[in-house]
Image (cartoon, rainbow, N blue to C red):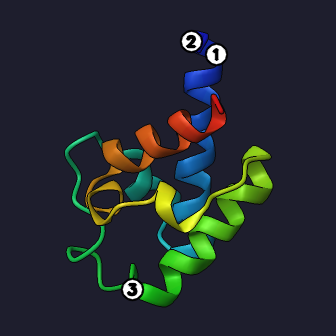
């Protein structure tokens, strides 16, 4: 994956977190790979997960099957970006 693609996926995931969870852009801009998401952000509940994955499919032009996502993929910002990158390659 090219650096531009990696940056684009990162920016898309940040945008999704702003749009789906209603977080501020400045807050999401401070997220790094270790920033905890699911279980740490009250806004990121099971309904938000479903919406986030659906929006990720639309914005990145990917198909996400249930078996593609593990709970750990939602635990931190870095894991969520890695999931999006991995599925963008298939």
Please name the residue shown 49% across and 55% down the image: 68
Mark 2 crowdedness (10 Å alpha carbons): few <14, some 14-19, many ≥20: few
Q: CA distance from mark 1 to mark 2?
A: 4 Å
Q: x%, y% of residue 44?
A: 39, 79
**Which quadrant holds residue 33?**
top left
Residue in the foreground of this view, choosing between 36 and 69: 69
Q: x%, y% of residue 28?
A: 42, 54
Q: Is residue 16 above or below residue 4?
A: below
Please name the residue shown 20% across and 74% down the image: 40
Sooner in the amino-acid sequence: mark 3 or mark 1: 1
Please name the residue shown 63% across and 58% down the image: 64
Q: Is residue 87 above or below residue 68?
A: above
The residue singled out by tag 3 in the image is 45
Q: Give yes or no for contact between labels 3 and 1 (Cβ–Cβ under 8 Å).
A: no
The residue singled out by tag 2 in the image is 3
Q: Give yes or no for contact between labels 1 and 2 (Cβ–Cβ under 8 Å).
A: yes
The residue singled out by tag 1 in the image is 4
Quadrant where the N terminus sits is top right
Q: CA distance from mark 3 to mark 2?
A: 31 Å
Dot 1: element:
helix
Mark 3 crowdedness (10 Å alpha carbons): few <14, some 14-19, many ≥20: some
Mark 1 crowdedness (10 Å alpha carbons): few <14, some 14-19, many ≥20: few
Q: x%, y% of residue 11?
A: 58, 39
Q: x%, y% of residue 78?
A: 33, 42
User: Can residue 22 be spotted in the picture?
Assistant: no
Q: Is residue 13 above or below residue 2?
A: below
Q: CA distance from mark 3 to mark 1?
A: 30 Å
Dot 2: element:
helix
Quadrant where the C terminus sits is top right
Residue in the foreground of this view, choosing between 38 and 19: 38
């Amino acid at each position: 994956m090219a650096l531009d693609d990696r940056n684009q996926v990162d920016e898309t995931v940040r945008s999704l977190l702003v749009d789906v969870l209603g977080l501020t852009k400045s807050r999401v801009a401070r997220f790094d790979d270790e920033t905890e998401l699911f279980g740490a952000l009250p806004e990121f509940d099971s309904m938000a997960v479903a919406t986030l994955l659906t929006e990720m499919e639309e914005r990145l032009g990917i198909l996400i099957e249930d078996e593609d996502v593990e709970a750990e993929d939602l635990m931190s910002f870095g894991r969520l970006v890695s999931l999006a990158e991995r599925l963008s390659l298939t």
